[in-house]
Image (spheres, coloured by chain):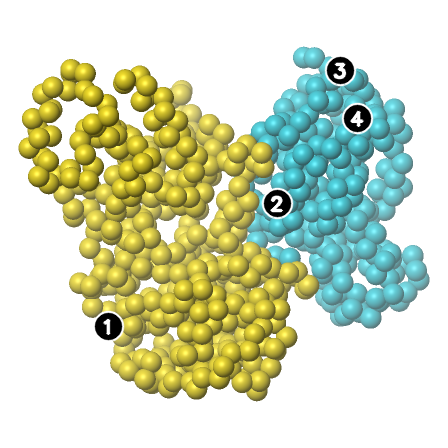
């Protein structure tokens, strides 16, 4: 590239190691050569080259191009490279799930208030621009280096407000799904995001997911067990919803008993956010104006919020934005994943270690392939590295396995 | 799609007349006059509409596709981006952006189907435009995204039109004004003015033609009537001069596209 020519596209970024694998692509850490800024690049796999640019990715591009706010992840750049689309985001250190799960962090009421305020601010901006996020959950709320919380992953987001447009109700992770969605509502509004925010609010206070249903029916059961089965007067439109089924009546528990350590204002806001009737549920903007945010204790300034212990602290640097936050089973890079493992997987690192060490010097001589199972042997069911969603990758590995075995014999 | 127009990229990216009617350097070298370019854009807008209505996509998708098409050629040249491939690809991209995806193979099928009614665009059968396939559309999709700088949200006059007609108690003019709005997509107005202004101009034309007195209502709106008049003039100019474009003139313009440089 000629001197002075502006760097653009793939040339502008130095690709680092893999940060994680999303539903439709791999995320890399990267550095912008021009600004020296650390970034995260999401590489979008093109479908089987039949339907072009992934609709989910397109949605994310379309909406993030319109949304610019300190509480929403910044889409810095988009560029095509080798037929793949690359989305360049600002780099975020961790996410709210890591904070909630990190037992070393004590979350004071002021900290919860800060996280909640930032979440609702981001949400209010989306709703003001008539955008539904539809996938709010702690690990989509990313945390920047200064503790700033930002909404991310707009792959399920949509513009709403067209009358008579029907949406799918299969959105959100189940635990964060509002009751109207679980009853199959197809014309819902921003209130679904508020319910999810309420679930996150409860999770911040309780330090565990609040309503952990194992199926859609069970999820509704869990909701009703906590807040009581809604009565007709509470939610008149409920019986008209497509998948409405009558539940056995269960009495509501008091919010005080559900959240014993929460303040009065906090409980009042939770109650308004967990309102059954979506028409009466508080909006994100109203929630921000609630007295909870105006009374003591004041929300902690974001730069003072504790960071979750970084996975970088481990001997081998693995920065994975995995859903679990810090439990990383797979090795960080592909080259390590496909290397052959000389030894019995089940006993590796235990008693067999000595034997393995003894074998090592003989590596050059032919080894009986039968006694040495390869790590990519599909028969050994001990491969936590394999991502079940990534079938093509799996298949590629299997192909290689078939290719390698006869050659070794 | 409702949404906040004033905060949108569409609003920030509105262009003026000069930017819209500029002819790309590469096209000038091929001998394209501004008039040629205008004719081509009108003809290709009809082409997109025709493919769209055959594929039974929503009107919104067609409108968005035409807006993409026109926006792309304010930045790129016909020589670099073959409009005969760009047109169906715009429709494909618009169908995705407007959440009602049409399969690429269906679009290819319908482009072939409507081709006989647009013979002037496809002068020779051994031209590569005759063989554009799914693969070409998908490849072009990526280039179009880049050419659009990934801005995909477009606002249209239809929704404000309905609201404004209701507000002024003029719902009896809905059908007429609606078709006027449809015809504004034969012009570059969508790239130049806020959609509600276009809607107002259409109401203005309709009320003059149907002899309805809307003066008081317009006065109450306190909009800049000069802008409305400019838009209205542009629409009337289209009806006066471009409603029927002789085939030869289109063919002449397309032939410039095919000349080897």
| Chain identifier of the residue bearing label 1 in the image | A
* Residue B96, numbered circle: 2
Task: Report which residue position mark 4 lands on.
Answer: B121
- Against B35, residue A74 (above or below) is below
Q: Quadrant of the C terminus of chain A?
A: top left
**Which quadrant holds residue A272?**
bottom left
| Chain identifier of the residue bearing label 2 in the image | B
Residue A208 visible in the picture: yes
Q: Nearer the viewer, residue B202 or A135?
A: A135
- Labels 1, 3: front one: 3
What's the colour of chain B in the image?
Answer: cyan
What's the colour of chain A in the image?
Answer: yellow
Task: Report which residue position mark 3 lands on.
Answer: B126
Q: Position of residue A118 (x, y in %)?
A: 37, 65
Sequence-earlier tag: 4 or 3: 4
Do tag 1 and tag 2 residues touch (Cβ < 8 Å)? no
Q: CA distance from mark 2 to mark 4?
A: 26 Å
| Chain identifier of the residue bearing label 3 in the image | B
Q: CA distance from mark 1 to mark 2?
A: 45 Å
Task: Report which residue position mark 1 lands on.
Answer: A108
Residue that appears at 83% across and 25% down: B120
| Chain identifier of the residue bearing label 4 in the image | B
Local crowd size for mark 4, using a 10 Å CA cut-off: few (<14), some (14–19), many (≥20)? many
Give left or right: position of B40 versus A152. Answer: right
Local crowd size for mark 1, using a 10 Å CA cut-off: few (<14), some (14–19), many (≥20)? some
Q: Are marks 4 and 3 on the same chain?
A: yes
Local crowd size for mark 2, using a 10 Å CA cut-off: few (<14), some (14–19), many (≥20)? many
Q: Are marks 1 and 2 on the same chain?
A: no
Do tag 2 and tag 3 residues touch (Cβ < 8 Å)? no
- Labels 4, 3: front one: 3
Dot 1 falls on a residue whose secondary structure is: loop
- Labels 1, 2: front one: 2
């Amino acid at each position: 590239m000629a001197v002075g020519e502006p760097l653009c596209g793939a040339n502008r970024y130095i690709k680092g190691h893999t940060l994680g694998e999303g539903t439709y692509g791999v995320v890399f850490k990267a550095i912008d050569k021009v600004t020296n800024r650390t970034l995260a690049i999401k590489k979008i796999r093109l479908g089987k080259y039949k339907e072009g640019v992934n609709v989910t990715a397109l949605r994310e591009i379309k909406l993030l191009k319109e949304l610019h706010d300190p509480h929403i992840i910044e889409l810095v750049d988009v560029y095509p490279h080798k037929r793949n689309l690359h989305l360049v985001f600002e780099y975020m250190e961790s996410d709210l799930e890591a904070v909630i799960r990190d037992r070393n962090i004590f979350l004071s009421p002021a900290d919860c208030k800060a996280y909640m305020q930032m979440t609702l601010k981001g949400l209010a901006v989306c709703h003001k621009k008539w955008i539904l996020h539809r996938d709010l959950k702690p690990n989509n709320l990313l945390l920047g280096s200064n503790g700033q919380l930002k909404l991310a992953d707009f792959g399920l987001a949509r513009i709403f407000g067209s009358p008579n447009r029907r949406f799918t109700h299969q959105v959100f992770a189940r635990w964060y799904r509002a009751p109207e969605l679980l009853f199959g509502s197809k014309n819902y509004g921003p209130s679904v995001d508020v319910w999810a925010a309420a679930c996150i609010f409860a999770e911040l206070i309780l330090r565990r997911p609040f309503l952990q249903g194992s199926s859609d029916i069970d999820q509704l059961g869990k909701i009703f067990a906590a807040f009581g089965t809604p009565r007709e007067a509470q939610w008149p439109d409920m019986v008209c919803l497509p998948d409405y089924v009558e539940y056995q009546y269960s009495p509501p528990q008091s919010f005080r008993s559900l959240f014993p350590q929460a303040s009065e204002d906090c409980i009042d806001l939770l109650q308004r956010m967990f309102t059954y009737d979506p028409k009466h549920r508080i909006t994100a903007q109203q929630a921000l104006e609630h007295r909870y945010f105006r009374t003591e204790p004041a929300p902690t300034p974001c730069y003072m919020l504790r960071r979750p212990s970084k996975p970088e602290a481990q001997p081998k640097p693995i920065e994975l934005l995995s859903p679990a936050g810090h439990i990383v089973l797979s090795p960080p890079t592909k080259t390590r994943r496909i290397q052959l493992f000389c030894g019995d997987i089940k006993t590796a690192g235990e008693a067999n270690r000595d034997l393995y060490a003894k074998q090592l010097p003989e590596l050059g001589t032919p080894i009986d392939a039968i006694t040495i199972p390869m790590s990519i042997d599909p028969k050994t069911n001990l491969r936590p590295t394999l991502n079940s969603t990534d079938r093509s990758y799996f298949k590629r590995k299997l192909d290689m396995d078939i290719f390698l075995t006869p050659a070794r014999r | 799609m409702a949404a906040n127009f004033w905060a949108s990229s569409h609003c920030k990216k509105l262009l003026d007349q000069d930017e819209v009617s500029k002819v790309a350097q590469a096209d000038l070298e091929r001998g394209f006059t501004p008039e040629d370019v205008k004719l081509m854009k009108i003809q290709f807008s009809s082409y997109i509409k025709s493919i769209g209505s055959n594929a039974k996509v929503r009107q919104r998708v067609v409108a968005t596709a035409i807006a993409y098409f026109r926006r792309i050629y304010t930045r790129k040249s016909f020589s670099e981006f073959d409009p005969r491939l760009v047109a169906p690809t715009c429709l494909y991209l618009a169908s995705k952006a407007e959440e009602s995806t049409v399969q690429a193979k269906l679009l290819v099928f319908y482009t072939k189907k409507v081709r006989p009614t647009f013979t002037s665009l496809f002068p020779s059968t051994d031209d590569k435009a005759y063989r554009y396939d799914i693969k070409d559309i998908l490849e072009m999709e990526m280039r179009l995204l880049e050419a659009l700088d990934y801005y995909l949200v477009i606002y249209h006059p239809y929704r404000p039109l309905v609201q404004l007609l209701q507000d002024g108690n003029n719902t009896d003019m809905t059908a007429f004004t609606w078709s006027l709005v449809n015809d504004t997509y034969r012009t570059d107005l969508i790239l130049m003015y806020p959609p509600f202004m276009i809607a107002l101009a259409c109401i203005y034309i309709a009320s003059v033609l149907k002899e309805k007195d809307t003066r008081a209502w317009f006065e109450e709106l306190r909009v800049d009537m000069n802008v409305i008049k400019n838009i209205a003039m542009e629409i009337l100019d289209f009806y006066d001069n471009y409603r029927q474009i002789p085939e030869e003139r289109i063919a002449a313009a397309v032939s410039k596209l095919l000349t080897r440089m």
